[in-house]
């Protein structure tokens, strides 16, 4: 049996080292986006995107992925104790490179903030059956509604690898660059 490439670590909120989730929440608030469906790449143990969107009265709902067993356990504890959060925040455990588009709806906002960070040597092998980073980006672009937004994190440890992938995608996909917001790079789907 081939094991899933899960993350053996966990990530608490370090706004100084990795402010991307806080900036995602701030960007959504600054745009005044309400009643949107958001896909978030990387929950952290803190689940700050799901919690903030559930509690801020925006009506936004979040589906987020974690590949960390501890982060997923933190989600179970969170929603066990907070029915209100459970109603609009769904975290699931998986490897984003194994995403099956049939299992996901379309989104208004997609965060690709950790693109290129967790590609393993075997990820795109025939045996493992995973996607490349470009294919992950293309899949989630397809899943973004027209007029919706795709966000990248410019301080990601994978951003130097992601930069040429994003540049090629910008030329080839039906997207346009909106600009920067704090540490985020924002695109809009045409
Ligand atoms: C450095 S942490 C950052 C967490 C959070 N976004 C933040 O900035 O505080 C990286 C996140 O990516 C998730 N992750 C790692 N490998 C992944 C994979 N293969 N598929 C999906 N998520 C993954 C981890 O579970 C973790 O939530």
Image: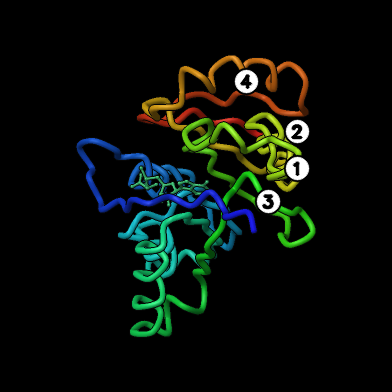
The numbered mark, 1 or 4, whose residue comes first in the sequence reads 1
Residue bearing the label numbered 2: 190
User: Residue 146: which numbered mark, if any?
Assistant: 1
Furthest toward the front, the residue is 1
Cα distance between the residues tagged 1 and 3: 21 Å
Quadrant showing the C terminus: top right
Task: Determine whether the residue tagged by mark 2 lies in a helix, strand or loop.
Answer: loop
**Vertical order, 111 against 102 (above or below):** above
Question: Which of the two residues, 108 or 101, is positioned nearer the viewer here?
Answer: 101
Discs 2/3, front: 3
Is there CB contact under 8 Å for labels 2 and 4? no
Give left or right: position of 119 versus 10.
Answer: right
Residue bearing the label numbered 3: 99
Task: Determine whether the residue tagged by mark 1 lies in a helix, strand or loop.
Answer: strand
Task: Determine whether the residue tagged by mark 4 lies in a helix, strand or loop.
Answer: helix
**Measured from the top left, where is residue 160 in percent x and y?**
46, 17
Give left or right: position of 86 versus 12.
Answer: right
Cα distance between the residues tagged 1 and 2: 5 Å
Residue bearing the label numbered 4: 165
Is there CB contact under 8 Å for labels 1 and 2? yes
Is there CB contact under 8 Å for labels 1 and 4? no
Discs 2/4, front: 4
Q: Which residue is at a point 39% across and 50% down the rendered structure image?
A: 25
Discs 4/3, front: 3
Cα distance between the residues tagged 1 and 4: 21 Å
Q: Which residue is at a point 41% across and 63% down the rendered structure image?
A: 69
Q: Is mark 3 within 8 Å of ligand 1?
A: no
């Amino acid at each position: 049996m081939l094991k899933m490439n899960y993350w053996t670590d966990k990530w608490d909120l370090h706004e100084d080292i990795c402010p991307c989730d806080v900036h995602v929440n701030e960007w959504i608030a600054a745009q005044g986006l309400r009643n949107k469906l958001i896909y978030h790449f990387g929950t952290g143990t803190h689940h700050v995107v799901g919690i903030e969107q559930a509690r801020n009265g925006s009506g936004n709902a979040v589906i987020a992925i974690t590949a960390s067993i501890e982060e997923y356990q933190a989600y179970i504890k969170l929603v066990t104790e907070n029915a209100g959060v459970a109603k609009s925040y769904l975290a699931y455990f998986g490897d984003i490179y194994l995403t099956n588009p049939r299992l996901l709806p379309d989104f208004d906002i997609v965060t690709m903030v950790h693109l290129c960070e967790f590609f393993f040597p075997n990820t795109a092998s025939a045996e493992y059956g995973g996607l490349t980073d470009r294919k992950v980006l293309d899949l989630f672009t397809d899943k973004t509604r027209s007029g919706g937004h795709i966000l990248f994190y410019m301080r990601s440890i994978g951003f130097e690898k992601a930069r040429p992938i994003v540049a090629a995608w910008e030329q080839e996909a039906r997207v346009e660059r909106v600009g920067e917001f704090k540490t985020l790079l924002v695109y809009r789907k045409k």
